[in-house]
Image (cartoon, helix red, strand yellow):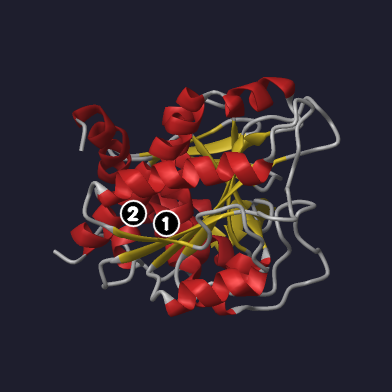
Amino acid sequence: MHSITRRLFVSQVVLLAGCRSQTVEARPPSSEDVPLAYMARLYSMATSTSSTKVVMKNKWSTLEVETDSRRAWINGVMVWLHHPCRKSGGAWVIKETDFKKGIDPIIRSYSYVPSKVPRVVVLDPGHGGKDDGATGARKVYEKKAVLSIANRVKGHLEAQKIQVRMSRSTDEFLSLQQRCDFAAQAGADLFVSIHADSAGDGSAHGIETFVLTAEGCDSSNHYGEPSDTSAGKGNLNDAANAVLGFSIQSNLLKTAKRSDRGLRRARFFVLKNAPCPAALVECGFLSNPEEEALMIDANYREAVARGISNGILGYMTLVNRARK
């Protein structure tokens, strides 16, 4: 692996793998609410509070939680909570679901990642065939752009002796169920679906990574169905999903150098029915003229591919470290 590439994903691994507090029991108080003060003690973090944020820091990580909001930042990367941070009994708290299936797995990944080292990665380029996906004003088709990116990711991972299977390697249509079935039949240990975004507002921009919404919770935005709070097969991997999604999002921001729309939650079919830890990446907005132009640029597609592959490699490094 190129030395610069290694630094890009290992820096994130070191930050998150170092926080091993032994002074506070890992189990939060017996309540649906977890006080931020409890989390600060657990992570041995110093705390400061402003009018809009509670900021907690130790030598490895910085955790910022926006009050009366669902937004948080871990080492500068946005993470969307299922529920807003609220005040309860004079203390700022988050819901236990967000602690156990979001924040804590990312900060203390060694306690949550599977013991099995991933051997097979399934890459899922979105759309294909009769389904063009999003289309930009300059006729950049999502199905073609993401296949190019996925092929580059495949090359980077195979250079590290990782077995990669592609749900599609040509311009063919696959149903969502076929994509999940392929992952199961391939014995996937990780599943990463690759997409490009679109919005009615041409100014929308940036990169976001989705993982499955927790059971009983609403999704982050209009991509999820607020009335659907059901569980899926993918919820068996809630904590690992968060670790994988964060690793991809944080590394992708470093290489693609686009704005951070955050690690978000949605009930996309391929996430809900994935047989293993899974994430879905949105690599930019084809409805945005600047980002559509970037998608035409092979250098940008390479930067995105590097970010995704670094994120996958970073997750694997966390698994290896947790086993020691």
- Locate the N terminus by quadrant: top left
Total count of labels:
2
Q: Quadrant of residue 320?
A: bottom left
Residue 161 is situated, as x and y percent measured from the top left of the image, at 21, 55
Please say whether residue 31 is visible from this viewpoint: no
Give me the residue at 45% from left, 79% from top.
185
- Is 270 above or below relative to 38? below
- What secondary structure is found at the residue carrying circle 2? helix
Residue 125 vs residue 204, the one in the foreground: 125
Q: Are marks 2 and 1 in contact (CB under 8 Å)?
A: yes
Identify the residue position indicated by label 2 in the image: 315
The nearer-to-camera label among 2 and 1 is 2
Mark 2 and mark 1: span between their CA atoms?
7 Å
Query: Where residue 254 sits: x, y (%)?
Result: 42, 30
As drawn, the label of residue 243 is 1
Residue at left 59%, top 57%? 94
Residue 254, compared with residue 1, is above or below; it is above
The residue lying furthest to the left in this view is 324
Q: Residues within 10 Å of mark 1 (few under 14, many from 20)?
A: many
Q: Does residue 176 lie above or below 209 as drawn?
A: below
User: What residue type is disc 2 on?
Assistant: Tyr
Which numbered disc, 2 or 1, marks the residue that appears first in the sequence? 1
Q: Which residue occupies the foreground of this view, 65 or 110?
A: 110
Say what amino acid the circle numbered 1 marks: Val
Residue at 28 percent across and 36 percent down: it is 11
Pick the quarter of the image with the C terminus.
Answer: bottom left
Q: Is residue 157 left or right of residue 138?
A: left
Q: Quadrant of residue 13?
A: top left
State the residue at coordinates (62%, 58%).
172
Secondary structure beneath disc 1?
helix
Q: Is 110 left, or right, of 265 in this rendering? A: left
